[in-house]
Amino acid sequence: MDLASTMRDLIQEVPGFPKPGILFKDITPIFSEPEVCAAISQHIARRFPDIDAIAGIESRGFFWGMLVAQELQIPFVPIRKAGKLPRATRRQSYNLEYGEAALEIHEDAILPNWQVLIHDDLLATGGTARAAAHLVNQLGQCVGFSFLVELSFLQGREQLSHLGLEIDTLLEY
């Protein structure tokens, strides 16, 4: 199976979401294709076999983040929007392509020597991923990023490249 072509066929574009002028790439149709879901998680696991944990960014980063963690038999660490985690957290503010936000991670979620992969569904401007890496690096070490889709015209890869970490994307627009 050509995974990128299959994903491109399944992903639906939604104009004007979450605000006018945005062309949202909806990955949820992939969920109805178990073979594609498995192929995605296997791809990510093969690309990053020697990590200690995977951190998924809320909320769509949770889907394959958890699947890959299960596949590799390693911990999954949720990185959530501010105010959603119940215990002591670290917080990082950042800019989105359509506003501002903050992410949080539990202070005890990552051990100091852990090598951590950050996963999210989409690389756009890179602000969310950069904020997530900052959080992970406060606790352990971010060793790379995994994304299903990259919107290369927003130059998010360039925003992350100075970190010197591997960036893996399955599909580029």
Image (cartoon, grey):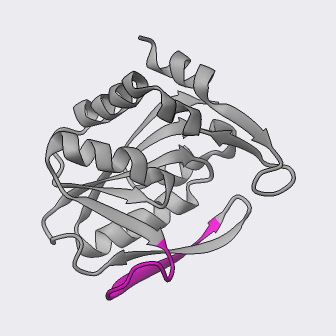
In percent of width and height, residue 71 lies at 20, 39
Quadrant in the picture for the C terminus: top right
Q: Residue at point 15% right, 71% down? A: 111
Per the image, is 26 magenta? no
Query: At which x and y percent is residue 38?
Result: 33, 29
Q: Quadrant of the N terminus?
A: top left
Give x and y (percent) for residue 156: 58, 48
Q: Position of residue 31 (x, y in %)?
A: 48, 35
Q: Is residue 52 above or below residue 99?
A: above
Residue 165 in view of the camera:
no
Residue at screen point 16% across, 52% down:
74
Quarter occupied by residue 9: top right
16 vs 28, left or right, is right
Q: Is residue 131 above or below residue 82?
A: above
In the image, taking residue 116 as reference, residue 111 lies left or right, namely left
Q: Nearer the viewer, residue 78 or 139?
A: 78
Which residue extends farthest front? 32
- Magenta segment boundaries in residue numbering: 81-95
| Placement of 165 over or under 9, stated as above or below | below
Q: How many marks?
A: 0
List the single residue furthest toward the top.
Answer: 1
In this view, the residue in front, 58 or 101, is: 58
Front-most of 54 and 83?
83
Q: Residue, x 36% and y 84% (percent of image)? A: 89
In the picture as drawn, the residue positioned furthest to the bottom comes out as 88
- Magenta stretch: residue 90 in it? yes
Say which residue appears at 21% left-offset and 69% top-offset: 110
